[in-house]
Image (cartoon, coloured by chain):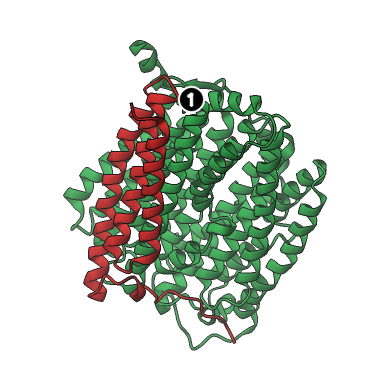
Amino acid sequence: MTINLLTNLSFYIPEMIAIVTMCSLLFMETAYANNERRRTFVYVTGFIGMLLCLFSLYKNLGIDSQGIFANAVVIDSFSTMMKMTMVIGTLGTFYISHKSIDIYDELKSEYLIMAVGVLVGGMLLASSNNMLTLYLGVETLSILSYVMTSLKRRDHLSSEAGIKYALYGGVTAGIMLFGMSHLYGLFGSIQFPDIIAGIKALEGFNIAVILSLLMFFVGIGYKIACFPFHMWSPDVYQGSPVPVTAFFSIVPKIAGIAVVARVTYSFFGTENMTTQVWNSMIAVIAALTMTVGNLSALNQKSVKRMLAFSSIGHVGLILIGVLTFGGKGMSSILFYTLIYTFMTLVAFFVTTMIVNRTGSDDAIYFRGLAKTHPILGVSMLIALFSLAGLPPFGGFIAKFNIISSAVGQGLYTLSVIAAINSVISLVYYLKLARTMVFDDADGEAKIESYSLASRVYVIGMVIPIIFLGLFWNNIYHLYSSAKIYLN
Amino acid sequence: MISLKAYLFVSMILMVTGLVVMISRKNIVAILLGIELILNSAALNFVAYSKYAANNLDGHIFSLFIIVIAAAEAAVGLAIVIRFFQVKETIHIDEASELREELTR
């Protein structure tokens, strides 16, 4: 048994690399935190660690799906691909944190430590196969996120956002645990395979099971910020430093979506009453999440808040993919999250630059950006068009795949709602685009921190958006071959 | 012998008390206490079910993890409360109202 667990470690190399990176960053932070020049070394270490992690995840793609550590954690290509997207997102936010003045210089290495920590939690969450690993993943993700939110000391908004996040997060985690405890009592095990077998054997409308499952959903739904549990998200996004906001809209969300997809697909494979209740709940939540997110984004002054609501809208779309997971849903979720990561990184990098110059993320400070800083402005335009789902860019392909998978499964109402929501989202994205292109800039305000490396970064992030919009077949085929492990 | 129902009843009361504390108290530290009550109700449930419903130790292990994580969460929560107190000089939840929607026009 012990030998068996040790051999399992060889499938767990990516997570171990991430953990080792986090620990070494922690040691380096104590040594170099006050030394301006040596801090670059901390960044290089984090960068190399994440690249190694990405590489070993890539190596893991070839492994057959299996459960490791006494079936507590699963290694399958679906979770590995989700983890790769998460690592790319973390790497992207590293550079944003390096550039941002929102994160004080002496705290930059702490940002790296906590970002990698959240990534470890997200990886655990994406491949969890029992309720204990799921809970541990959620809490690793959450506890570090609370600290990241209030990273900007001496700032009213940041500490207030931290309080709100911690209180909401604590109570939803508690409700999720309460639901889990009743599921344990009802099915006699915390392992997903046993619960799946239990749900399969159910007949008729079992109110206890359904109530426990609803409570269970509260915790995950909170992490992905879907409709009834989304109200923390705009406040926390607005209060946090910009790199943290970028990080929150990528890593915890993708991890949460991975776990919602796994639970929905594996728990509810058979046609019975419980499955119908769960699926219709997800469908209603998807429709409401999209609509509420996009409608609330319409007149926001703060760009961070607007992006928060727009990411709520995107989660609603991805939930449609969760519903159609058995069909084309899996590949469309994977594709959507990848594109979404790049678009979000570009949008938040530009916002960081604006915040660096003006100290505020108000939409009026984006005036004339395309004229004063052409590369930055055009990149932001491409990111906005792609987020809105306009044709030549990756966002269009992503949305198209989700909607076509919904049509393929006969979810016509949801596809119509998704299409209407794309139109609504166009309004606020294009409004910001108009401000950037047609309005005049106030004076010759140059962005001090906008260096050559920044140009390279932003162009490097825009290329995948365009490239994946034109030549999406190869990566889509790779994603179509993803497998999910059951039992 | 105490029945399973008694345990479930106590944990239900703990859960509801926690939620009521969350909603009604204005002191942030008291709200954190409410969260602890909710977590403990879940831990009690796990132990009770482990003894009566499922014949395995999963529930015991789970409740140990809950205790550890609740401690970590309380530590981080209190640290954030201290930060909040330093900038605002109060721990009244109604003071946490600076983040709000501002609409154009």
Q: Which residue is mark 1?
A: A188
Is residue A51 something that shows in the picture?
yes
Q: Kindly identify the amino acid type of the residue bearing the numbered disc 1.
A: Gly
Q: Is residue A446 above or below residue A145?
A: below
Residue at the image position 70 percent from the left and 46 percent from the top: A280
The foreground one among A213 and A440 is: A213
Give chain A's shade: green
Rendering coords of residue B103 (x, y %):
56, 81
Is residue A115 something that shows in the picture?
no
Badge 1 marks a residue whose secondary structure is loop
Q: Is residue A122 above or below residue B2?
A: below
The N terminus of chain A appears in which quarter of the rendering? top left
Rendering coords of residue A226 (x, y %):
57, 55
* Image chain in red: B
Judge the density around disc 1: few (<14), some (14-19), many (≥20) Cα neighbours within 10 Å. many
Residue at the image position 66 percent from the left and 59 percent from the top: A288
Rendering coords of residue A164 (x, y %):
39, 63
Residue at the image position 57 percent from the left and 36 percent from the top: A209
The foreground one among A103 and A324 is: A324
Residue B35 located left or right of residue A407: left
